[in-house]
Image: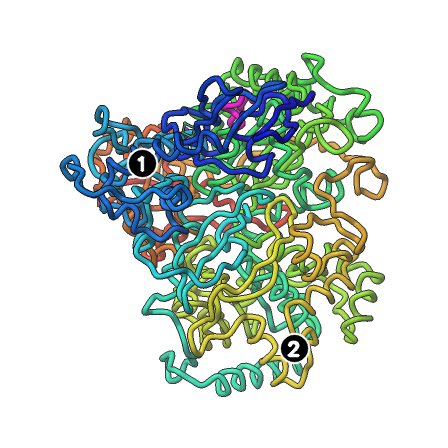
């Protein structure tokens, strides 16, 4: 783009065409106040604090005036005008507006810079009061300067449109668009309004009156798999505020209610701070020496007699280094491959399906490729709730002109902005994806040159697709044939389409087939790897579920996805570990429970998972835990699983430890300790070391940095990853095979990673789901996430988020509710073939007639007592997205 040359206080500067005078002034190394401006937002130019003199002839708002060749901007000469603008703003505020610490008020900083003080003797308008109804967003109306930044941030960054300006003239003030208190508004508590507010009119609890913050720690969020960079400010050992990091981060200065605000659980009164051992049927406090000794003695005798009598469920919440150590413990100390992680319950079909199709088990493209995509196919995912920052960025992209196809049974937030919304009956994905592929072929929207060069299997696929005309797919899925065609045309005609998908694709009896047939679309279109487009990208659930699998916390795969069955891979690990690796794959999580119920599992160690709450058919899970002679649990709180364990280790949370996570687009990022854990609490890393040591084994890797270094040595995929490098250079995408590799944000640029270098199209027929409705169980239950809570809710239920969402609810379509005589908030009894649960009715047209939706964040609600043990035939991932239930008023 051609540049523009102009002069700022006599100094020549060049800025890109389209830049504003404000950007030109900044390019000259100068600053201007800009109280109504935020670089991320549209411009309104209402505050006049950025006025500058142009060519000696007049004043212009720098934030909104385009830079032009030859302009002469006199910043210094117009200083007094800006000072007057600031003074006029301050004159309408109470004097306390300037008492706020400067690091928390842009207005205070600018007034200090310009020598503006609170005026005396001015008659202030009547006080307008505060709205402190919300747990995280506090409004002081008297500090509002009506700049509108909060309103635009809510709309343009978050995509929620919850705020507006009300009143006239000097009385103009921000307010929820719904009227009434903030807590009852559409606000989703992302904090974007607080972060952009220049005066402190919007703030978070206690922040404006604090003593100076002492320390900032840059770390990675420990909630969902987006991997937002967060800057944690502390005073002493207390977290005062958590702000989203800006440039270079996946979140680009945005966050959600969980990462931004939900850290109060760290200081919860019921935090575990001492180990527990079950004695005479009761969990009783023990010393670390006792607990470690007890576990080591029991595991030692299992190792010496029946190593495969031990199994370990590692944690998608723990760091990579802890997961690496956990799988090393299972394999080298206990001598078994019985290690798995909760990707088994969510994205195991992604790993299997993507690896079978493309060669590697991760998403194909960096999330930033969204910016170059002109169409998004969003399938089986509600990122607005489950991955809020991703949801916001997709929303922003759509507002910028990208087309959007949503495939989801529910009317999700993003579905409201979709060009086409397909609502297939749960369990019919494969038919829908084959139907879309059929239309691509029929309409000549297939990139045949790409297929010839880079794929195999298209002849077989083309033959199968003949059986999936839109009319037949409509009969199977309920998706109107015309909508299916429209969606296929939209994806097929885009220049650079991207696919994002979630658990609505994977958590099915045929979940791996779903991933493969969805991936077919990108291959047919040539929109992945060497072709243009944004590829195929799973939205991973937990913060480090990608990393837990990357580290080899899987029964059939060693670190870096090396097969247990591969002698060379076992030898590579054994060479470093100095212990032979068991040659056969171990048990998956469901098989661990089967083995426990069958009496062949002697000990199960569960690290950081509440399997009694989150795993399907919880009645059967409880039976497994009861049957297993020794259950060990690491957790922050006495979760349902911890309460059923024989030994509980109290462990540190993500804000209290050091290491790395891998996010959903394969980005290794540093996790840094912001605060010390409570006295008596240890990291999972330390607990594994302690038990191994007591068993006479040395796991090596004394520190997380050493564990990462060792992992890099045994896993070629991560050979160039290290803590020092991440500290120095920032995030790195795997594969990153050596210290001179810059990482690989975009996979398969030259060839796919399969043995033949070709992507493998999959010809898979639609097969019916495992669960079916009948007269006794006429409704389909879909389970998923609510925006305010996270997984089993053990963290978010111990924060202000509980005020935002206090109970588990079940979404029921209005017509169904009327037929059942249900009103909003009524208790509803749900019964399935596996169990029962009582939830509050939430009546909404977000669900289709005959379908209901529930979260699973409240253990007491027992939602997973309803779900079945039907699982993906390839990977064992449960069919969470489809359970036949009946409903009745409780
Ligand atoms: Fe330019 Fe407000 S920042 S007018």
Q: Give me the residue at 72% from left, 44% from top.
A: 355
Q: Nearer the viewer, residue 248 or 783?
A: 248
Picture layout, residue 410 above or below residue 54? below
The response on whether ligand 1 sits within 8 Å of label 1 is: no
Q: Name the quadrant containing residue 514.
A: top right
Picture layout, residue 454 above or below residue 755? above
* Numbered range of the magenta stretch: 397-414
Of marks 1 and 2, which one's residue comes earlier in the chain? Answer: 1
Give left or right: position of 643 versus 352. left
Ligand 1, image quadrant it occupies: top left
Instruction: Classify mark 2: helix, strand or loop.
Output: loop
Residue 58: image tag: none
Crowd tier of the residue under label 1, counting other residues whose Cα lies within 10 Å: few below 14, some 14–19, many 20 or above: some
Q: Which residue is mark 1?
A: 87
Q: Which residue is mark 2?
A: 306
Give left or right: position of 57 versus 136. right
Q: Give me the residue at 64% from left, 72% from top.
A: 703
Whether 213 is among the magenta residues is no
The response on whether ligand 1 sits within 8 Å of label 2 is: no
Can the viewer see residue 412? no
Q: Position of residue 785 (x, y in %)?
A: 42, 44
Q: Give me the residue at 33% from left, 32% from top.
A: 162
Q: Position of residue 617 (x, y in %)?
A: 44, 54
Whether 401 is among the magenta residues is yes
Q: Position of residue 34 (x, y in %)?
A: 43, 34
Can the viewer see residue 312? yes
Instruction: Classify mark 1: helix, strand or loop.
Output: helix
Q: Nearer the viewer, mark 1 or mark 2?
A: 1
């Amino acid at each position: 783009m051609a540049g523009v040359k102009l002069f700022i206080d006599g100094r020549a500067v060049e800025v890109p065409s389209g830049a504003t005078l404000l950007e030109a002034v900044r390019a000259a190394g100068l600053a201007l106040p800009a109280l109504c401006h935020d670089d991320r937002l549209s411009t309104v130019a209402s505050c006049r604090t950025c006025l500058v003199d142009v060519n000696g002839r007049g004043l212009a708002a720098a934030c909104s005036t385009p830079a032009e060749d030859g302009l002469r901007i006199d910043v210094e000469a117009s200083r007094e005008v800006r000072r007057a603008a600031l003074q006029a703003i301050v004159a309408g505020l109470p004097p306390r507006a300037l008492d706020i610490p400067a690091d928390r008020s842009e207005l205070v900083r600018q007034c200090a810079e310009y020598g503006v003080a609170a005026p005396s003797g001015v008659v202030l308008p009547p006080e307008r009061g505060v709205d402190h109804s919300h747990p995280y967003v506090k409004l002081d109306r008297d500090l509002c300067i009506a700049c509108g930044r909060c309103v635009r941030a809510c709309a343009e960054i978050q995509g929620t449109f919850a705020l507006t300006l009300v009143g006239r003239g000097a009385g103009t003030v921000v307010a929820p668009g719904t009227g009434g208190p903030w807590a009852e508004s559409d606000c989703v508590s992302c904090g974007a309004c607080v972060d952009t507010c220049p005066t402190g009119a919007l703030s978070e609890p206690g922040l404006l009156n604090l003593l100076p913050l002492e320390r900032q720690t840059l770390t990675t969020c420990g909630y969902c798999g987006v991997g937002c960079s967060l800057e944690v400010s502390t005073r002493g050992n207390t977290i005062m505020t958590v702000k989203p990091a800006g440039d270079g981060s996946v979140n680009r200065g945005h966050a959600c209610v969980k990462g931004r605000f939900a850290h109060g659980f760290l200081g919860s009164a019921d935090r575990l701070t001492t180990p527990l051992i079950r004695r005479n049927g009761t969990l009783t406090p023990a010393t670390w020496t006792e607990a470690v000794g007890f576990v080591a003695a029991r595991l030692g005798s299992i190792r010496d007699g029946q190593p495969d009598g031990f199994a370990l469920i590692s944690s998608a919440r723990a760091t990579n280094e802890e997961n690496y150590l956990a799988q090393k413990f299972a394999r080298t100390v206990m001598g078994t491959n019985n290690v798995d992680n909760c990707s088994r319950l969510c994205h195991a079909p992604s790993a299997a399906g993507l690896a079978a199709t493309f060669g590697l088990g991760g998403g194909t493209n960096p999330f930033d490729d969204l910016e170059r995509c002109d169409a998004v196919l969003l399938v089986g995912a509600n990122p607005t709730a489950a991955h809020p920052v991703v949801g916001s960025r997709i929303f922003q992209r759509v507002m910028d002109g990208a087309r959007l196809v949503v495939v989801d049974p529910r009317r999700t937030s993003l579905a409201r902005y979709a060009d086409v919304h397909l609502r297939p009956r749960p369990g019919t994905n494969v038919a829908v994806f084959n139907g879309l592929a059929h239309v691509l072929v029929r309409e000549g929207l297939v990139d045949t040159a790409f297929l010839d060069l880079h794929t195999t299997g298209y002849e077989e696929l083309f033959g199968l697709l003949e059986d999936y005309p839109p009319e037949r797919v409509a009969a199977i899925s309920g998706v109107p044939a015309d909508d299916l065609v429209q969606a296929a045309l939209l994806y097929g005609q885009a220049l650079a389409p991207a696919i994002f998908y979630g658990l609505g694709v994977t958590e099915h009896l045929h979940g791996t087939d779903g991933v493969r047939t969805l991936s077919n679309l990108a291959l047919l279109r040539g929109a992945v790897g060497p072709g243009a487009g944004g590829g195929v990208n799973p939205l991973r659930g937990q913060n480090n579920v990608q990393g837990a699998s990357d580290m080899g916390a899987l029964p059939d795969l060693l670190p870096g996805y090396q097969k247990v069955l591969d002698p060379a891979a076992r030898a590579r690990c054994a060479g470093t570990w100095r212990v032979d690796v068991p040659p056969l794959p171990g048990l998956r999580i469901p098989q661990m429970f089967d083995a426990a119920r069958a009496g062949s599992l002697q000990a199960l160690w569960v690290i950081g998972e509440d399997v009694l709450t989150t795993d399907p058919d919880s009645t059967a899970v409880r039976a497994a835990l009861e049957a297993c002679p020794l259950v060990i649990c690491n957790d922050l709180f006495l979760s349902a699983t911890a309460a059923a364990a024989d030994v509980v280790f109290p462990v540190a949370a993500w804000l209290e430890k050091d290491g790395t996570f891998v996010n959903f687009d394969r980005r290794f990022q540093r996790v840094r300790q912001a605060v010390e854990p409570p006295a008596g609490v240890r990291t999972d890393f330390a607990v594994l070391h302690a038990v191994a040591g007591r068993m006479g084994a040395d796991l090596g890797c004394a520190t997380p940095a050493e564990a990462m270094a060792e992992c890099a040595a045994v896993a070629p995929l991560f050979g160039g990853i290290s803590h020092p490098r991440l500290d120095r250079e920032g995030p790195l995408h795997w594969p990153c095979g050596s210290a001179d590799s810059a990482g690989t944000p975009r996979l398969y640029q030259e060839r796919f990673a399969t043995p033949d270098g070709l992507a493998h199209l999959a010809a898979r027929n639609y097969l019916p789901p495992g669960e079916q409705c009948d007269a006794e169980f006429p409704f389909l239950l879909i389970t998923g996430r609510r925006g305010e809570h996270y997984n089993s809710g053990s963290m978010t239920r111990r924060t202000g988020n509980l005020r935002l969402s206090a109970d588990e609810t079940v979404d029921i379509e209005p017509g169904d509710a009327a037929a059942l005589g249900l009103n909003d908030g009524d208790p509803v009894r749900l019964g399935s073939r596996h169990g029962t649960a009582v939830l509050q009715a939430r009546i909404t047209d977000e669900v289709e007639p005959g379908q209901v939706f529930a979260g699973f964040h409240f253990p007491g609600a027992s939602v997973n007592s309803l779900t079945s043990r039907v699982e993906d035939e390839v990977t064992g991932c449960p069919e969470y997205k489809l359970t036949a239930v009946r409903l009745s008023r409780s």
